[in-house]
Image: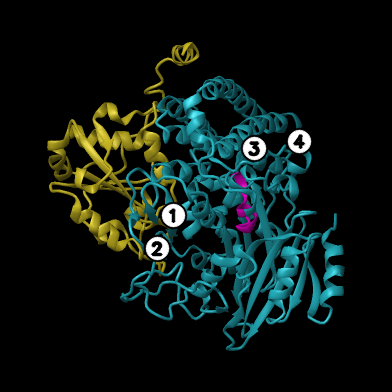
Chain colours: A cyan, B yellow
């Protein structure tokens, strides 16, 4: 098992001349490379058996007006040791071309298209250069994250049509679905190509809900942007606000009090619980098993009402803040939480026995929407979806944050990658979350729950942060600007990674099973579109 | 079978087991109440998300759970705008969703009620001014009812709908 340091020396041996510099960013090794050499090194990290780096994040920064350069950063998670490794390269002056890594690393596909849309930098050799975020009616040359683009620009209307990938032939027809769906679902477009019942191809066409979140971050100060992070994806309020706060705390050098760490874990697990309960019910509902949906909806509601009682918000808005938590629960309140959760867990266990005894339900879930291990690896699938397909990754264990170092969560792992596996991961995690919260109650230290923000980072300093939200790993990169402003904030919801994977999971399934498969992924449209 | 029955008996009726909501901050206008008259006992709602953070969707979904059980008031969710009496719109209207919203509005048969749900739909909330947002819902289609909140609680939505139905004066 090689750790990141051994990996560095290994890379030094193999590509000594290409590496311009090695530095360290809050414990993560950073390799600086020339634009030309980057794809080769990235390919090596991705494929070398001792490293097996999965691409976790790819982002660009426009350093103007301080420096006339763009920076591209590639974050890899090494599978063997679960360490991070960061590759960075610069595009100087007016240079707008870089080499695409997508031909070798499939997971980079959407990231590079996103960078092209948002910055106007062109990934040479990318197999698919259609627009991603900018729809066809956006005027040419609109690249919102460039520093010379004003955040409140009023866009003009242009004409154009998105070219879907077409399958043609006798008996092949297309089924367009969305952007507005037939239930209470967010907006997104799906284009199926089918011959008879089985799906031959699905193309996901999203970003209808693009609100310009990353540009809005740049208008805010580091300490003021938590409410915006909470609204990146409403169902992941705690996950996103926590990831954002952790990055800012690293920048400001704030030491969060131990009690706040425990409370943060508690709130994060509460969020996981209510979402997973809702999902288990919704999966059953899509097989027309309404009874389970009703029971799960009822249990989910109990937790949301508990949240409301504790924090005055059903989604725990305003609870996480820079420096800790604004809501220091009393021991009595924590006891109330665990008592309620004990009751819900018993309730849920009874329902589980009913579900497992139902053969027709199992029949619908098994072998439906299989995302096999290879496809999951190629897409770098994460979170619930990844763990159902054998990707053994969980930030809570791999890069412990909040109080998870002491809590040691058990990771649910399945290999079949079908709808049932994804439901099983959720069921296991429901029990694990309840156990963690009981553990939190037993271990939680006394003391304050909030440290005052202090200090100011130098312009250009930046920090990375990761949180295992209920969907999967949420990543934030926050770079400080002048006088406490945010220069750049890269937000990565797990949905952005897992949406392309759904295109594979549905192949060969029938269209009536798509809602079921989609529900078992349950990805955020808002978090994806930003 | 026995397990299922036992579970149902043990659970009992949960409908209505939620904290009471305060009176709506924005009372329903007499015009809106007048407009709702034909739909007092049956209101088919089409939910349109024009760029919300999905918390409003979660609360709309919660309306259908056994605790709130909105169907007992004759409110149900329609699968097509052509079957709808009312549109519930959530979120600031994004550049990409503007046309879809207008299309949905045109496809909904008259008379129709437009309900702007949540702060974003009413005044764009945190996303006001962004290059990707074209304005609140009322900039594009006429709005009859506003239900503020970020997000409004299901009980508050129920209350607002009840007021609309019954035409109570605040």
Classify mark 2: helix, strand or loop: loop
Give the Cα distance between marks 1 and 4. 56 Å
On the image, the x and y values in percent for residue A289 come to 42, 28
Give the Cα distance between marks 2 and 1. 8 Å
Of A512 and B123, the residue lying toward us: A512
* Residue at the front extreme, as displayed: A170
Q: Which residue is mark 4?
A: A445
Per the rendered image, the range of residues in magenta is A375-384
Q: Which residue is mark 2?
A: A167
Q: What numbered label is drawn on residue A200?
A: 1
Q: Residues within 10 Å of mark 3 (few under 14, many from 20)?
A: many
Whether residues under marks 2 and 3 lie with C-beta atoms below 8 angstroms apart, the answer is no
- Dot in front, 4 or 2: 2
Q: Chain of mark 4?
A: A
Give the Cα distance between marks 2 and 3. 49 Å
Quadrant in which residue A290 is drawn: top left
Q: Earlier in the sequence, mark 3 or mark 4?
A: 3
On the image, the x and y values in percent for residue A374 come to 64, 53
Q: What numbered label is drawn on residue A266?
A: 3
């Amino acid at each position: 098992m090689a750790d990141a340091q051994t990996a560095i020396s290994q890379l030094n041996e193999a590509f000594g001349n290409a590496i311009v510099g090695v530095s360290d960013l809050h414990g993560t090794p950073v390799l600086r490379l020339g634009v030309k050499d980057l794809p080769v090194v990235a390919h090596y990290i991705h494929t070398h058996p001792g490293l097996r780096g999965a691409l976790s994040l790819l982002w660009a920064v426009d350093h103007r007006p301080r420096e006339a350069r763009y920076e591209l950063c590639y974050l890899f998670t090494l599978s063997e040791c679960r360490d991070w490794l960061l590759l960075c390269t610069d595009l100087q002056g007016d240079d707008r071309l870089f080499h695409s890594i997508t031909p070798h690393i499939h997971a980079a596909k959407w990231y590079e298209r996103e960078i092209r849309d948002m910055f106007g930098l062109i990934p040479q050799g990318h197999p698919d250069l259609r627009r991603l975020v900018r729809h066809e009616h956006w005027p040419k040359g609109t690249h919102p994250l460039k520093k010379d683009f004003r955040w409140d620009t009023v866009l003009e209307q242009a004409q154009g049509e998105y070219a879907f990938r077409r399958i043609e032939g006798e008996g092949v027809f297309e089924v367009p679905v969305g952007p507005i769906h037939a239930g209470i679902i967010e907006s997104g477009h799906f284009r199926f190509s089918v011959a008879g019942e089985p799906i031959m191809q699905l193309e996901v066409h999203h970003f209808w809900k693009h609100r310009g979140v990353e540009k809005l971050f740049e208008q805010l100060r580091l300490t003021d942007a938590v409410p915006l992070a909470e609204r990146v994806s409403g169902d992941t309020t705690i996950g996103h606000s926590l990831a954002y706060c952790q990055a800012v705390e690293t920048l400001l050098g704030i030491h969060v009090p131990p009690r706040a760490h425990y409370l943060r874990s508690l709130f994060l697990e509460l969020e996981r619980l209510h979402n997973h309960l809702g999902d288990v019910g919704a999966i059953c509902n899509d097989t027309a098993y309404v009874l389970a949906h009703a029971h799960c909806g009822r249990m989910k509601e109990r937790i949301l009402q508990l949240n409301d009682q504790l924090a005055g918000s059903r989604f725990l808005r305003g609870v996480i803040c820079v420096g800790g938590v604004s809501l220091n629960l009393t021991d009595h309140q924590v006891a109330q939480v665990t008592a309620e959760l004990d009751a819900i867990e018993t309730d849920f266990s009874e329902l589980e026995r009913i579900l497992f005894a139902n053969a027709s339900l199992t029949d619908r879930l098994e072998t439906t929407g299989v995302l096999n291990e290879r496809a999951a690896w190629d897409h770098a699938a994460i979170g619930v979806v990844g763990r159902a397909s054998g990707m053994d990754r969980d930030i809570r264990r791999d890069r412990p944050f909040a109080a998870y170092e002491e809590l040691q969560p058990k990771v649910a792992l399945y290999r079949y990658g079908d709808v049932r596996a994804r439901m099983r991961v959720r069921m296991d995690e429901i029990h694990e979350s309840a156990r963690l919260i009981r553990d939190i109650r037993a271990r939680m230290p006394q003391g304050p729950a909030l440290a005052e923000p202090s200090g100011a980072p130098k312009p250009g300093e930046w920090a990375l942060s990761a949180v295992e939200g209920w969907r999967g790993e949420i990543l934030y990169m926050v770079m400080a600007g002048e006088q406490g402003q945010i220069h750049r904030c890269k937000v990565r919801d797990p949905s952005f990674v897992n949406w392309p994977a759904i295109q594979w999971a549905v192949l060969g399934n029938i269209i009536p099973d798509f809602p079921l498969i989609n529900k078992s992924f349950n990805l955020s449209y808002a978090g994806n579109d930003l | 079978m026995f397990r299922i029955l036992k579970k149902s008996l043990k659970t009992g009726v949960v409908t209505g087991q939620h904290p009471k909501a305060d009176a709506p901050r924005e009372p329903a206008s007499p015009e809106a109440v007048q407009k709702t008259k034909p739909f007092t006992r049956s209101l088919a709602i089409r939910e349109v998300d024009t760029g919300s953070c999905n918390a409003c969707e979660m609360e709309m979904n919660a309306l259908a759970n056994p605790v709130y059980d909105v169907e007992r008031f004759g409110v149900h969710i329609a699968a097509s705008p052509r079957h709808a009496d009312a549109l519930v719109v959530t979120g600031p209207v994004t550049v990409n969703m503007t046309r879809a919203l207008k299309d949905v509005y045109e496809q909904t048969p008259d008379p129709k009620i437009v309900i702007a749900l949540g702060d974003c739909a009413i005044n764009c909330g945190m996303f006001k001014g962004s290059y990707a947002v074209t304005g609140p819902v009322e900039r594009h289609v006429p709005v009859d009812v506003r239900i503020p909140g970020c997000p409004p609680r299901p009980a508050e939505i129920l209350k607002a709908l009840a007021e609309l139905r019954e035409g109570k004066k605040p």
